[in-house]
Amino acid sequence: MKNFIMLMLLLSTLGCTTQTRYTQQSTEIDIVKSNISNYVNGEWDAYAANYANGATIFFNTKEENPSSIQETIAGQKLSLEPFSSYSLEGGEDEFEMVVTDGGETWVNFWGVWKGTLTANGKTFEMPVHLTHHFVDGKIVKTFGYWNSAPIQLELLKMEEAAAEMDEVETPE
């Protein structure tokens, strides 16, 4: 009887499969790495191709204000115009894939965005967090968080200085 119980325990253990709930190497992580490269290189069609139709994107916003991939790309292009160079950097340890208790697959990225303004050569660095929800190998939802306030303030100062110069050059 003791041998029978041990055999049943062994067989029940062999029959169990465990799903990987956390990893730093996956196809989904490779897709996110590819998208970061596409962003940096301005390869917007390849960037968009990793998103599912109808995907929603929330960059520095709540879920009440979704953007489509087309709206997001247009916004990214516009926000990059003042920069002579930019990058988004992270090492291997800054990527992880998790499968939630509900079975959702998410890939997280932590990195540093760096950019140099064309007008004055000022360089900015911002910590960035991106998290992507995957279904069937495509991104269906992305959240992104960073603080762009220092850049916005610098652009505003440059705009105000230009306006003051215009006033000085055009006397009434």
Image (cartoon, rainbow, N blue to C red):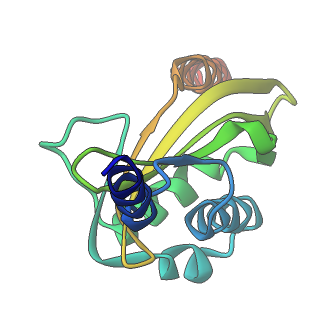
Q: Quadrant of residue 139?
A: bottom left
Position of 7 compared to 161: left or right?
left
Residue 137, placed above or below residue 124:
below
Please state which of residues 172 and 90 is positioned toward the viewer in this rendering.
90
Residue at image coords 55%, 65%: 28
x and y percent of residue 39 in the render?
Answer: 66, 62
Residue 143, placed above or below residue 13:
above
x and y percent of residue 131 in the render?
Answer: 45, 45
Q: Quadrant of residue 138?
A: bottom left
Please state which of residues 40 and 169 is positioned toward the viewer in this rendering.
40
Position of 86 compared to 141: left or right?
right
x and y percent of residue 164 in the render?
Answer: 60, 17
Residue at image coords 87%, 30%: 121
x and y percent of residue 41 in the render?
Answer: 76, 66
Residue at image coords 35%, 78%: 52
Residue 158, placed above or below residue 46:
above
